[in-house]
Amino acid sequence: MSTRFDGRSSAKFAALAFAAFCGIGSAQAADKQFLIGFSQLGFDHPWRVAMNDQIQAEAKKHPELKVVITNGQNDNAKQVADVENLLQQKIDLLIISPNEAAPLTGVVKKVYDAGVPVIVVDRSVLGDAYTMFIGGDNKLIGVKAGEYTAKWCADQKLSPCNVLEITGLSGSPPAQDRSSGFAEGLKKNPAAKVVASPTSEWQKEKAMPAAAAAFQANRNINVVYGHNDDSAAGAYLAAKNAGLDLKKMLFVGIDGLPDPTGAIVSVMQGRQGASFVYPTGGAEAVDWAYKILVKKEKAPKKVTLGTDEINPGNAAEMCKKYGCKSN
């Protein structure tokens, strides 16, 4: 007995076979796990730790993704080596928060030119050899901090109103933008002037001696603007140790973390006058990695994240919004 296939049967069989093949292909694609390398510039700051935590938490939502995190130890050469190593591991996508722009540009371009998507977070690199950038608007946040300071000086009827600006790492784009933005915002009050701009390199431990030296040189400082909250906190301790009248001073910072030692709690407790939230972008980076690798979506070149002003009037509300953590 023989079996005969007519044209319609053959077509039907071919269609079923094709559908089965496509199904297998789809199942294989769904089972594929993509390797994401995250090159973090360092682990020694609470804001960086928060970024790491948010990246890991977001990645857990997607079983298709596996994330490997490296610690650049705030060293350009170490971070370059980290990225080179991740590339050798055949990562499917790189997320990087560069220590400094120029030294990391070359290795980022190397990864991008190798056909690996690159998401740059927080700090930019030079040129446009990357897939997308995600970060807050440092210039705008600086402007807002400057305007807040200008208004406070006017409200206190201080003329002159002497401002100590404690800068972040001088070669980093965030420090440059936060400084230029602050200067722009401060122009709203001609009586407000920056009298010194030492660097803390984002570290509380370095902000303390830098501020102490500034207070020794000028005991008439009215405002401290820290490029991050750790810098403002270090200056607060230095002012306290110097015996200055803290109730007559304003301490402004950037980050707005909800941790027990973060700015939201500090504002609520009266140590810091204001802070501006600088989102880490960690969760957004992983979300876009998922869209690029799994959903095959085209990413925009730039995603700018918003901010919130934290002040004594809304600190409790911000605490609820961002979920303040207890010890």
Image (spheres, rainbow, N blue to C red):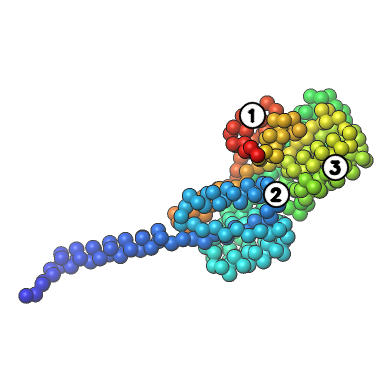
Say which residue appears at 76% left-offset and 54% top-offset: 171
Asked if 9 appears above or below 56 in the picture, the reply is below
Q: Are marks 2 and 3 in contact (CB under 8 Å)?
A: no
Give me the residue at 75% from left, 34% from top: 272
Left-right relation of 40 to 160 = left
The image quadrant where one finds the C terminus is top right
**SS under mark 1:** helix
Residue drawn at (79%, 42%) of the image: 234
Return the mark for residue 273: none
Secondary structure of the residue carrying numbered label 3: helix
Inter-mark Cα distance, 2 to 3: 19 Å
Q: Residue furthest bottom?
A: 1
Of labels 3 and 1, earlier in sequence is 3
Label 2: which secondary element: loop
Q: Is residue 122 left or right of residue 13?
A: right
Q: Is residue 112 visible?
A: yes
Residue at the disc numbered 2: 45
Q: Which residue is mark 1?
A: 316
Q: Mark 3 highlights which residue?
A: 211
